Amino acid sequence: MTTESPRWLKSSYSNQDGGGACIEWAPKHARHTGEVLVRDSKTPAGPHLTLSVDAWAELVNFAKFQG
């Protein structure tokens, strides 16, 4: 387990809708721990979700078909 703060990256789909619904995730953390951290880019100091790799894949798949 790492004690470093995660490095957050914004979704590649951010700003396609004017910047309203953006998320960030921490890919390096996911590679090292198997936990996918996700947060709202508009509130970076707020809470984040911790997802399994399978749950993350399901979320991404769900989001693809919502537009």
Image (cartoon, rainbow, N blue to C red):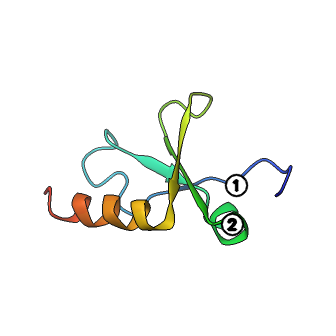
Q: Where is residue 66 in the image (x, y as percent from the top left)?
A: 14, 56
Q: In this view, does 22 lie to the left or right of 65?
A: right
Specify the quadrant of the image occupied by residue 47.
top right
Query: The N terminus is located in which quarter?
Result: bottom right
What secondary structure is marked by label 1? loop
Residue 2 is drawn in which quadrant?
Answer: bottom right
* Residue 7 - label: 1
Q: Which residue is drawn at 55% across and 38% down?
A: 48
**Mark 2 or 1, which is nearer the eye?**
2
Q: Which amino acid does label 1 sit on?
A: Arg
Give the class, few, some or many, for how many residues have Cα within 10 Å of label 1's Cα (few <14, many ≥20). few
In this rendering, the answer to whether 46 lies above or below 16 is above
Q: Which residue is drawn at 22% across and 65% down?
A: 64
Q: Which image quadrant: the C terminus?
A: bottom left
Left or right placement of residue 64 versus residue 9 in this view: left
Q: Which amino acid does label 2 sit on?
A: Lys
Residue occupying the far bottom of the picture: 31
Q: Which residue is drawn at 15% across and 63% down?
A: 65
Q: Which of disc 1 and disc 2 is earlier in sequence?
A: 1
Query: Whole-percent x and y of residue 19?
Result: 34, 43
**Residue at (31, 38) in percent of width and height:** 20
Residue at the extreme right of the image, as rendered: 3
Residue 34 rendering spot, x and y as whole percentages? 63, 66
Residue 11 vertical placement versus 3 (above, below):
below
33 left or right of 44?
right
- The foreground one among 1 and 27 is 1
Image position, residue 4 (x, y; %): 84, 51
Q: Is residue 15 above or below residue 28?
A: above
Pointers 2 and 1 in contact (CB under 8 A)?
yes
Q: How many labels does the image show?
A: 2
Q: What element carries label 2?
A: helix
Q: Name the residue under label 2.
A: 28
